């Protein structure tokens, strides 16, 4: 089974998380970036930068998804979740 890492937000700390996740070279990494135009996608190397709408529309059921949410006010900056529901993920921080 492949793993899809979805990072919700492009922050300065996002690069550190990407480097850590790239240790698993066959996993897919997507960064949900608010600066990407509606419905668009941008690929930089092996990393995909996309809108929230694009990510929600292209989710594949046979992938194991791990979601990361940036919580700047907490000691552990990245919260990891395997929740399927986008609504449930909003309460992680």
Image (cartoon, rainbow, N blue to C red):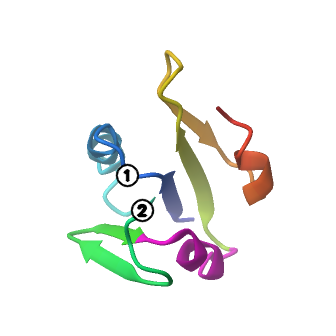
**Percent coordinates x, y for residue 45 in the rendering:** 20, 69
**Residue 69 sits in quarter:** top right
**Residue 58 sits in quarter:** bottom right
The total of numbered circles placed on residues is 2
- Mark number for residue 10? 1
**Secondary structure under the numbered disc 1 in the rendered image:** loop
**Percent coordinates x, y for residue 24 in the rendering:** 35, 52
Position of residue 80 in the picture relative to residue 9 (left or right): right
**Residue 51: within the magenta?**
yes
**Residue 15 sits in quarter:** top left
Above or below, comparing residue 33 to residue 62 in the picture: above
Residue at image location 59% in from the left, 76% down from the top: 53
- Which sits in the foreground, 62 or 14? 14
Q: Which residues are magenta?
A: 50-61
Query: Mark 2 or mark 1, which is nearer the start of the sequence?
Result: 1
**Percent coordinates x, y for residue 71 in the rendering:** 53, 31
**Residue 8: within the magenta?**
no
User: Pointers 1 and 2 in contact (CB under 8 A)?
Assistant: yes
Residue at image location 45% in from the left, 52% down from the top: 9
- Mark number for residue 65? none
- Mark number for residue 33? 2
**Percent coordinates x, y for residue 90 in the rendering:** 71, 46
**Secondary structure under the numbered disc 2 in the rendered image:** loop
């Amino acid at each position: 089974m492949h793993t899809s890492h979805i990072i919700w937000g492009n922050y300065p700390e996002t690069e550190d998380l990407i480097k850590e996740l790239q240790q698993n070279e066959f996993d897919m990494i997507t960064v949900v970036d608010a600066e990407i135009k509606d419905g668009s996608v941008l690929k930089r190397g092996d990393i995909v930068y996309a809108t929230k709408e694009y990510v929600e529309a292209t989710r594949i059921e046979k992938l194991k998804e791990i979601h990361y949410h940036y919580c700047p006010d907490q000691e552990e900056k990245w919260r990891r979740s395997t929740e399927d529901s986008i609504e449930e993920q909003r309460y992680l921080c």
